[in-house]
Image (cartoon, grey):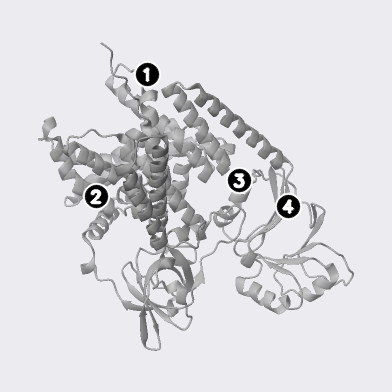
């Protein structure tokens, strides 16, 4: 008897949320890029409603055909695109009529609440605040918005606390970047988090209106603070304490930056963030406490009890994107178990992304969201094929191989993103991730035990000592692996086009292996060839580059000459090496010039037929010496009119030898005399190619 022909469903039919997430993400992306600035959220919702009505009419009266499928696809895509645009528009604080940034007034006083713990900087405290009202002449106007206040440490006895209410002056300044080559777009990052203004002030500029009353704290905040206190009490070593607080409670206020960097260099920085691993271990702890419920039919009871506890834990730990993603996926899994429904992991992942982006559209650009989503997607797609490569005989070896297979599968989609954002590829990621998974599991269990046994100090102290020893051993292991990674693997660069081509190549190989489609393999090979061509082109540009840069750093000029794949320091900033490295490293990385092996070439440079003179001191001569660009590299007050007559430059560059106020004064004094002044603090780094 002949069997009825079966139609093999495409993956977007088995994972229908994929068709919702993609246009939703495109709508969010288009709003962020400002492609439809003239469209408001209400207009976008009207478009979504019209498209939804069309979709219903097609579903009720349409006849199945090629045109019908195209029409329904277009209608559904327009619905989700418009919804993505709308939620982004309404999420943007600038579209709120009460946003304080629309009516800034230096004569007003602003009432604000401190919404998070202050962060210590080199010379100030970074205080995130929520603006509640503006006060002027006895009139109080309700306003909305978040901002940043930098409180100078001078004469500051102690930083304010989270929850305090303060009065601040109206000296708001837009958040903007320093303007150095390839720097992290901090202004864009803040804007995506609805932060657009900041101010720097002394302790005398603010007034404490009301101290924080702990009685008004939410239960989650109280639990978080209590957990932090217990870890403070029973883990004596600061480096371990900061790591454990970040891993268990999501609070990175005490996290050592060197430790974070070493974990990033070896590819295990993900264990610091609250994610699916934390939720899994937390659920294992709950299952252990419910060990009497052994029968499979009682499994739904464990999930029903664990579900609210997992959400309480995630909210208590700061509700980071990766944590919320893990909690939603766990919730969908729990509901499928309780309702005795099959769980489609791929559809669950896309459903999670859909819910997250509807609630927080700008999380689309969050690194935590992107990396955690890519890691889970990669494991879903590649884990089973990779795990099938080997079949270890013993249970311990099978468990170890499962961890290795998970590490390899996750890295396939995560590695390109890590290179794209962080310019690093950890060569020994398999060894590091296997060790990190075991380490994370043990440390999380120990830290939960410290909190659980805090009522018995002698036991909690002993567990704390074991935790410190374990972190110290793992620290040394990570440092050892960090030293084995080649230096060139810390300066890798991928453009956006190259990133897309690499993912195209990976997708082609996957389709070929799963669906046996040779067209996919050919597409993958073409994408790989295009990537190699792009790499060769980039290498040619690197070998032929010649640049002169005056960076916008801190206390003094940082001037470099880049030639080929190397750089020479002509003048170094007097600030901290860490801060200077933060400024210059992106340029060295993206220009692929990270070797300091060029001798200092002097004070006159010929860059592309243009002459640049570095003036390191005042001159007494009146003889004319024409140059194209003049860099003033000394601290005495310059007579720019005299320098203009002597050198006749098309622009005079003044840098960080002068403070921001001094640069503004110089521009004001000499700018109206017809002298073209380039101020690095105002315009960003000066780059001569």
CA distance for labels 1 and 3 = 39 Å
Q: Are discs 4 and 1 less than 8 Å apart at CB?
A: no
Q: Nearer the viewer, residue 378 or 613?
A: 378
Q: Is residue 243 visible?
A: no
CA distance for labels 2 and 3 = 40 Å
Bin the neighbour count of mark 1 within 10 Å (Cα to Cα): few under 14, some 14-19, many 20 and up. few
Q: Label 1: which residue?
A: 390
Q: Label 3: which residue?
A: 589
CA distance for labels 4 and 1 = 53 Å
Q: Position of residue 418 (x, y in %)?
A: 49, 41
Q: Is residue 463 visible?
A: yes
Q: Quadrant of the N terminus?
A: top left
Secondary element at tag 1 = loop
Q: Residue furthest right?
A: 623
Q: Nearer the viewer, mark 2 or mark 3?
A: 2
Q: Residue furthest top?
A: 1
The disc at residue 311 is: 2
CA distance for labels 2 and 4 = 53 Å
Residue located at (66% from left, 77% from top): 665
Q: Position of residue 18 (x, y in %)?
A: 37, 40
């Amino acid at each position: 008897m002949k069997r009825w022909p079966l139609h093999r469903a495409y993956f977007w039919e088995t994972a229908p949320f994929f068709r919702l997430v993609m246009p939703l993400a495109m709508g969010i992306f288009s709003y962020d890029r400002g492609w439809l600035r003239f469209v408001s959220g209400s207009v976008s919702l009207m478009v979504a409603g019209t498209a939804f009505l069309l979709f219903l009419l097609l579903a009720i009266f349409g006849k199945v055909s090629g045109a019908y499928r195209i029409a329904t696809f277009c209608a559904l895509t327009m619905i989700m695109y418009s919804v993505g645009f709308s939620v982004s528009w309404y999420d943007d604080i600038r579209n709120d009529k009460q946003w304080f940034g629309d009516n800034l007034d230096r004569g007003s006083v602003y009432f604000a609440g401190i919404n998070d713990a202050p962060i210590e900087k080199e010379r100030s405290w970074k205080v995130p605040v929520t603006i509640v009202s503006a006060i002027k002449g006895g009139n109080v106007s309700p306003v909305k918005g978040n901002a940043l206040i930098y409180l100078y440490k001078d004469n500051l006895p102690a930083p304010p606390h989270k929850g305090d209410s303060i009065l601040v002056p109206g000296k708001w300044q837009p958040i903007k970047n320093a303007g150095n080559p390839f720097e992290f777009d901090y202004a864009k990052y803040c804007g995506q988090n609805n932060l657009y203004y900041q101010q720097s002030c002394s302790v005398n500029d603010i007034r404490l209106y009301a101290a924080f009353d702990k009685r008004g704290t939410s239960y989650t905040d109280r639990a978080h603070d209590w957990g932090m206190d217990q870890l403070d009490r029973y883990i004596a070593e600061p480096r371990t304490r900061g790591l454990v607080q970040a891993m268990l409670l999501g609070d990175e206020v005490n996290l050592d930056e060197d430790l974070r960097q070493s974990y990033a260099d070896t590819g295990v920085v993900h264990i610091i963030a609250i994610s699916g691993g934390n939720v899994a271990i937390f659920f294992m702890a709950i299952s252990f406490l419910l060990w009497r419920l052994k029968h499979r039919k009682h499994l739904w009871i464990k999930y029903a009890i664990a579900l609210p506890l997992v959400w309480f834990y995630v909210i208590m730990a700061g509700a980071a994107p990766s944590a919320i993603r893990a909690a939603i996926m766990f919730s969908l899994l729990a509901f499928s178990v309780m309702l005795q429904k099959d769980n489609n992991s791929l559809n669950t992942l896309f459903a999670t992304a859909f819910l997250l982006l509807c609630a927080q559209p700008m999380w689309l650009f969050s690194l935590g969201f992107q990396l955690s989503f890519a890691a889970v997607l990669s494991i879903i797609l590649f884990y089973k094929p990779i795990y099938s490569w080997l079949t270890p005989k013993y249970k311990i070896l099978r468990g170890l191989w499962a961890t290795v297979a998970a590490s390899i599968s996750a890295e396939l989609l995560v590695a390109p993103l890590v290179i794209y954002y962080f310019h690093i590829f950890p060569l020994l990621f398999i060894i590091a991730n296997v060790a990190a998974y075991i380490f994370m599991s043990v440390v999380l269990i120990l830290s939960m035990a410290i909190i659980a046994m805090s009522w018995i100090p002698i036991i909690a102290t002993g567990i704390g000592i074991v935790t410190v020893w374990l972190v110290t051993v793992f620290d040394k292991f990570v440092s050892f692996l960090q030293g084995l990674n080649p230096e060139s693997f810390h300066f890798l660069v991928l453009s956006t086009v190259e990133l897309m081509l690499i993912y195209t190549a990976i997708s082609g190989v996957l389709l070929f292996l799963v669906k046996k489609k040779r067209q996919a393999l050919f597409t993958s090979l073409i994408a790989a060839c295009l990537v190699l061509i792009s790499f060769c082109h980039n290498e040619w540009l690197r070998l032929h580059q010649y640049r002169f840069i005056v960076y916008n750093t801190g206390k003094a000029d940082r001037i470099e000459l880049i030639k080929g794949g190397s750089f020479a320091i002509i003048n170094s900033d007097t600030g901290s090496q860490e801060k200077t490295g933060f400024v210059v490293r992106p340029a060295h990385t993206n220009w692929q010039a990270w070797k300091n092996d060029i001798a200092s070439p002097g004070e006159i440079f010929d860059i592309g037929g243009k002459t640049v003179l570095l003036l390191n001191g005042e001159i007494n001569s009146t003889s004319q010496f024409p140059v194209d660009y003049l860099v003033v590299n000394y601290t005495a007050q310059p007579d720019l009119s005299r320098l203009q007559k002597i050198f006749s430059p098309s622009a005079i560059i003044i840098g960080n030898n002068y403070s921001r106020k001094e640069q503004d004064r110089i521009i004001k004094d000499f700018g109206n005399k017809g002298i073209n002044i380039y101020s690095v603090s105002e315009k960003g780094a000066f780059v001569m190619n």
